[in-house]
Image (cartoon, helix red, strand yellow):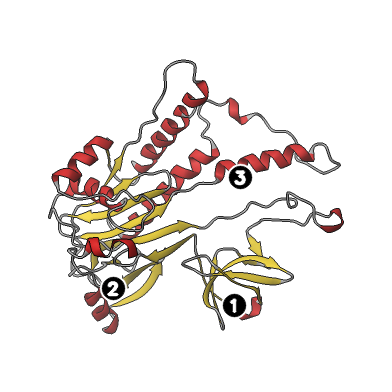
Amino acid sequence: MSHIFVPVVDSHQRPLMPTTPSRARRWIRGGKATHFWKGGIYCVRLNVEPSARETQPIAVGIDPGSSKEGFAVVSASHTYLNMQVDARTGVKEAEAKSTQMRRTRRTRKTPCRQPRQNRRQSKKHLPPSTRARWQWKLRLAAFLCQLVPVSAFVVEDIKARTRKGRQLRWNRSFSPIEMGKLWFYNSLHKLAPVTIKRGWETKSLRDALALKKTGSKMAEVWEAHAVDAWVLAFSVVGGSIVPDNKRLICITSLLWHRRQLHYFQPGKGGKRAPYGGTLSLGVKRGTLVRHPRWGKAIVGGTRNGRLTLHHPETNKRLTRSARVSDCLTIKLIRWRTRLAPLYAPQQKEASVSSPCLEG
């Protein structure tokens, strides 16, 4: 029987070895620990001096992807955490819209900023979409270092495929990818030692362990992306060839629309209402609140002096007419976290032989 392990920190927020849910419950009942949530993950903080501070080598496997990415926190004894993360996308399109609106404002009688130096002349410049994609991975890696004592990172290297001839438009994307991953590797080295594995090495390790990978890349199952992340971490720490924990935590970053002077299209009467920003009636967008009717919800935009609330797991809009006075602030969050079901509906029959997991 496998279960999700509970991260443990001491009274100074320094990470210790994770523990089992049953032991964490005993600590809380006895007053030895206090539970709290960090990034959507249940954790405990010790109120007493820990009996031991020795830690085992823990590796974090990272499987980058274009739409979905896999993270696995593994030691020789247990698999502590499996995560499937939605990649950061949409920045390139947002920057294109921003450029378009800035250029159209130049033909109108609208205040605008002074021209700045052309930053694209720098050879070390990272495009906004590339920086956002790799910075999102770095944020999650730093977040995991706050939960568990990470001793190593193992990353699957990606290669930008180039073409021969004068296909400059295709080969132009080679440099941002290479610069982005090198920036990520250098930044990751500041947290823990980094090991790089090629794609064919990951496949060879996966085949040697007789682990299967599903062809459905968008499925929220362990066999989609977390399996490669687990294999990468296993290559460093070793241990049992069968993972004892396949529960999957899905993470999606919250998206903020940058403040714009107005909508792209004018409304009635030719007026353009303001759009975007990070505050809604004085409340930071992305704040987790408790509403007397809708329960826990995330603060979104505003409409007619009322707040818009969204479901914390599915991001489905719950209401557009919530009063600020009715919302009790819990904490500010930066991504949505949800626990994937034990088995995907389309793979129930194919996964009958898998071990039963505790919720």
Q: Upstream in the sequence, badge 2 or badge 1?
A: 1
| Type of the residue with mark 1 | Cys
The image's mark for residue 359 is 2
Residue 330 pos. (x, y %): 51, 73
- Residue 31 is tagged as none
Task: Give the labeled residue for mark 3.
Answer: 94
Report whether 180 appears left or right of 292: left
Q: Residues within 10 Å of mark 3 (few under 14, many from 20)?
A: some
Q: Position of residue 34 (x, y in %)?
A: 34, 76
- Residue 134 is situated, as x and y percent measured from the top left of the image, at 44, 43
Q: Residue type at mark 3?
A: Ala
Q: Determine the CA span between mark 3 and mark 1.
A: 31 Å
Residue that mark 1 sits on:
327
Quarter of the figure with the N terminus: bottom left
Residue at x 66% of width, y 77% of height: 323
Residue at 22% from the left image edge and 37% from the top image edge: 201
* Quadrant (top left, top right, bottom left, bottom right) of the C terminus: bottom left
- Sequence-wise, the earlier of marks 3 and 1 is 3
